Image (spheres, rainbow, N blue to C red):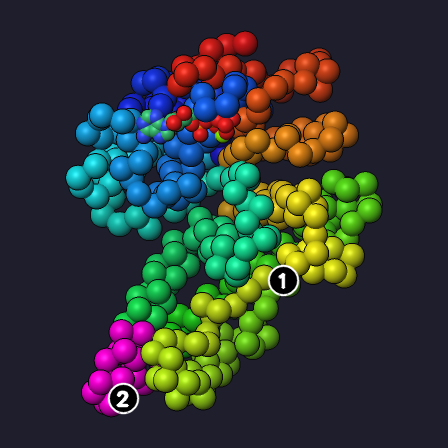
Amino acid sequence: MKLKKITYSNFRNLDTMTFEPHDQITLLSGENAQGKTNMLEAIHICCTGRSHRTSRDKELIKFGSPSAFIDATCMQNDGTHRIEIKLSSTNKKAVRINNSPARRLGQLMGHMNAVMFSPEDLQLIKSGPSLRRRFVDIALSQMSSTYFYNLQRYIKALDQRNSLLKAIAVTKNVDTLDIWDAQLAKYGAYLSVRRAKFVKSLDTKCSKIHSELTGNKEKLEVKYQASFQTDNEEELEEKLVAHFKKHRDNDIKRTTTTAGPHRDDIIMSVNGIDVRAFGSQGQQRTCALSMKLAEVDIMKKITGEYPLLLLDDVFSELDNSRRTWLLNYIGNVQTFITCVDIDKKLLHDRNDVDIRIIENGKLHKS
Ligand SMILES: Nc1ncnc2c1ncn2[C@@H]1O[C@H](COP(=O)(O)OP(=O)(O)OP(=O)(O)O)[C@@H](O)[C@H]1O
Ligand SMILES: [Mg+2]
């Protein structure tokens, strides 16, 4: 897919503007704190309904303004898709898809897809399992709104079960736990099977990308770690029901659901060594980048469309040969790269790159 046009109004520090990007690579260059990441953030919000930096809409609205507005038009094989998002400091965000109001955020999925790589993605490797699950969940949600809805249902059932566990500490009445166990097992099995399958294809793709990116020095392996390894959803559902039962006493004691797909993880190793614990910062960053680039390929395979690729500050930790590799690898994927300095040598003779300068929220041609 290609982003044809995006209008920003009162979004963070950005001037109200309409930007019609290049079909291939747009390089957004500028000094620190000028609005480069803000431009990518707004594109990402059109794709997923959420910012990658904050869950508070208010922060996205220009200081002193009551609301902000993003209006994006992209082209897919099946035609034009228009996404309009109004962010308000007092109301819920209002979303319009192809000129009609959307009742649920889930309706947004699939109209505009993006893969974003940002400095925060180092945490994808470094921090706890929740960010890694989130990475997989966002990817799968963009590819399937059913996945998104089932994820919401799982989260809701988990909340309800946890509230009930707290109540049981007082009432000692465990009657309705079975209902929530059944719900969790049903949606949990759905999520787990799809996550495991996604991570398996991720593993194949990213090990190839990573070895190219590191000049064959590193072999990256990615594995989905769950309580049960099965790709049979019904069988897993039964196993999960038994699993919740088995942990019930402990759950009641701890007043929370201690086991289940919300505790699963993605394990990453480089040359057989756990990169989370032992990887250098550069190694961890490169692993995150390989995973994101692999995600691009998987999305293309599943949806038939390349997503947009948003690379925030990706050059800062790559040497020149890796930068060149990356620019060549991107190929036909419409990509937005932010950077502080442009290496003119790197871009010499490339006609697939449009360089824009961003200064104090204003965009200029270079
Ligand atoms: N709600 C807001 N209203 C106005 N300005 C904001 C708002 N939120 C953030 N900003 C400002 O936007 C500016 C640009 O932020 P952005 O993160 O896009 O910078 P950047 O160009 O990516 O810089 P860096 O190179 O350091 O990553 C910052 O100075 C920040 O203070
Ligand atoms: Mg930035």
**What kind of residue is marked 1?**
Ile
Q: In this picture, which residue range is highlighted in magenta?
A: 161-181
Q: Position of residue 316 (x, y in %)?
A: 64, 30
> Is 288 or 196 nearer to us in this picture?
288
**What kind of residue is marked 2?**
Val
Residue 141 visible within the image:
yes
Mark seen at residue 336: none
Residue with the mark numbered 2: 174
Q: Position of residue 273 (x, y in %)?
A: 74, 60
Q: Is residue 164 magenta?
A: yes
Task: Please tell me which of labels 1 and 2 falls first in the chain.
Answer: 2
> Is 185 or 217 nearer to us in this picture?
217
Look at the picture and state if 157 lies above or below 281: below
Identify which residue is drawn at 43% across, 37% down. 44
Cβ of mark 1 under 8 Å from ligand 2: the answer is no
Q: Is residue 145 left or right of residue 129?
A: left
Residue with the mark numbered 1: 267
Residue neighbourhood size for the residue with mark 2, other residues' Cα within 10 Å, grouped as few (<14), some (14–19), many (≥20):
some
Identify which residue is drawn at 19% across, 29% down. 66
Identify which residue is drawn at 53% across, 38% down. 118
